[in-house]
Amino acid sequence: MFDTISIADDVVSRITQHYHHIGQSLAWPDNLPRSTVRSSTPLHADIARFVQIANGDLDRTTADDQTIGELIERFQNLLDVLFLPANGQYTYRIPTTFWSEAGIGQVLARVQAWLRHDDLISLSEAAQLLFPELACSNLQAARMRVKRLTERGDLMIYLAPDEPNPTQQGRVSRQAIEALQAAGYKHS
């Protein structure tokens, strides 16, 4: 027979651990001096750092291994806070639509590219790399092929917030384009 007390204790324990994890991201540690300004949470600080990276304010080539490791840890922590289920199982799915959200999704997508030391290139550049012959004769048709790859989910689309022309804001990963080339992707 099922034991109500042990099952309830297990569920409460899992949920408590989950909320404790979230609470750690939302509150400053108690050991900070009282004089320390606490206007924002550790999560605010992490997001501010990620926005700096996404905006191109931090140079990847000057970041040391310790900084990269800390950023990867903080990045994973944010994903855990956003998507980790209360049962504490570290198997969760991030909806593919999350990465294209105009706010945090695009910021974190750009941080991922930064952490991988990846370049984000325009759809025109991607078209010239993937479809060189077509791009020479009809760049727009080659760009549309790259756009279709993003629409099918074969390539992730990134937005360049500094690009004033909304039709030119799309970017793709140079590494992803090179991987498609290496895999022999040739749709003329």
Image (cartoon, helix red, strand yellow):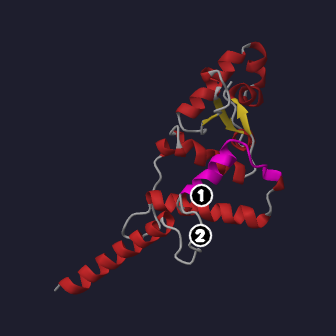
As for residue 126 lying within the magenta part, the answer is no
Callout 2 environment at 10 Å: few (<14), some (14 to 19), or many (20+)?
A: few
Looking at the picture, tell me which residue is in the foreground, 84 or 177: 84
Image location of residue 117, percent across then percent down: 76, 50
Give residue 134's mark.
Answer: none
- Name the side, left or right, on which 116 lies relative to 3: right
Under mark 1, the amino acid is Ala
Residue, x 53% and y 58% (percent of image)? 39
| Residue that sits furthest to the right in the current view | 62
Looking at the picture, tell me which residue is in the foreground, 92 or 188: 92
Residue, x 66% and y 17% (percent of image)? 141
Looking at the picture, tell me which residue is in the foreground, 90 or 33: 33
What residue is pinned by disc 1? 45
Residue, x 80% and y 62% (percent of image)? 64
**Which stretch is magenta?**
44-61
Image location of residue 7, percent across then percent down: 25, 81
Question: For the residue labelled by badge 2, is the local secondary structure a helix, a strand or a loop?
Answer: loop
Give residue 35's mark.
Answer: 2
